Image (spheres, helix red, strand yellow):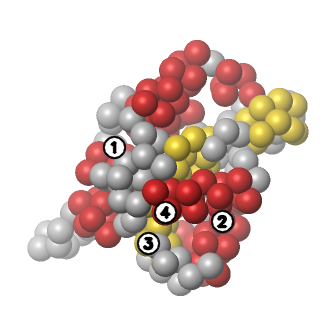
Amino acid sequence: MARILLGVSAGIAIYKAVDLASTLTQRGHQVFTLMTPNSRKFITPLTFRAVTRQPVFTDTFDDDPESRPEHISLSEWGDIMLLAPATADLIGRIAGGLGDDIITTTLLAWQRPVVLAPAMNDRMWAHPIVRANLEKLRGLGYAVVEPEEGHLACGSYGVGRLAEPVRILAAVDAAIAAGPGREA
């Protein structure tokens, strides 16, 4: 089975990421969760630790000066990285090559498949900058699981809902089957 890094960013769809983590674990995968600082305002690391029985990483650097930086060791540990939900902010920071949290710094050292599952407001999803950032990431080999249409937490109706778990899991399966290269 695969070693999966699940990166979660700050969006209301984060509650669905808990179900994804649980399902991946039940399938026999080893899942380490990486959380952006703002994602912890929606849900605590304990929730992910409880469903995966694995560590949750919330900070780029360990307090122990003798230890190896987490983002480097994580980039060598995992077989695949799943980013769900991936907010417009996270997508933009990744596309810009920024490394300011545990997810983005790990990605800068990452050389294996990445599956990105965006979730955001429909107007944000349609914004030309978000679209351009996604095309850039697709060009770099990131697999993108398009969001779905439906009622959004903000009260709007449109495209932006995190894809159903079955679609995300299928993309993860395809990335695992594709092997160690960047593309899925």
* Dot placed on the residue nearer the N-terminal end, 2 or 4: 2
Q: Nearer the viewer, mark 4 or mark 1?
A: 4
Classify mark 1: helix, strand or loop: loop
Classify mark 3: helix, strand or loop: strand
Q: Where does the image place residue 23, in percent across and percent down from the top left? A: 67, 73
Q: Which mark is residue 20?
A: 2
* Dot placed on the residue nearer the N-terminal end, 1 or 2: 2
- Disc 1 marks which amino acid? Asp
Q: Nearer the viewer, mark 2 or mark 4?
A: 4
Q: Nearer the viewer, residue 44 or 35?
A: 35
* Dot placed on the residue nearer the N-terminal end, 3 or 2: 3
Report the residue marked by disc 4: 176
Q: Nearer the viewer, residue 25 or 88?
A: 25
Distance between mark 4 and mark 3 Cα atoms: 10 Å
The picture quadrant where one finds residue 58 is bottom left
Label 2–label 4 contact, CB within 8 A: no
Label 3–label 2 contact, CB within 8 A: no
Report the residue marked by disc 1: 100
Label 1–label 3 contact, CB within 8 A: no
The residue at 43%/72% (across/down) is 3
Q: Nearer the viewer, mark 3 or mark 2?
A: 3
Classify mark 2: helix, strand or loop: helix
Residue lying furthest left: 66
Q: Nearer the viewer, mark 1 or mark 2?
A: 2
- Disc 4 marks which amino acid? Ile
Horizontal placement of 68 versus 156: left or right? Answer: left
Report the residue marked by disc 3: 3
Distance between mark 2 and mark 4 Cα atoms: 16 Å
The residue at 52%/30% (across/down) is 134
- Disc 2 marks which amino acid? Leu
Q: Nearer the viewer, mark 4 or mark 3?
A: 4
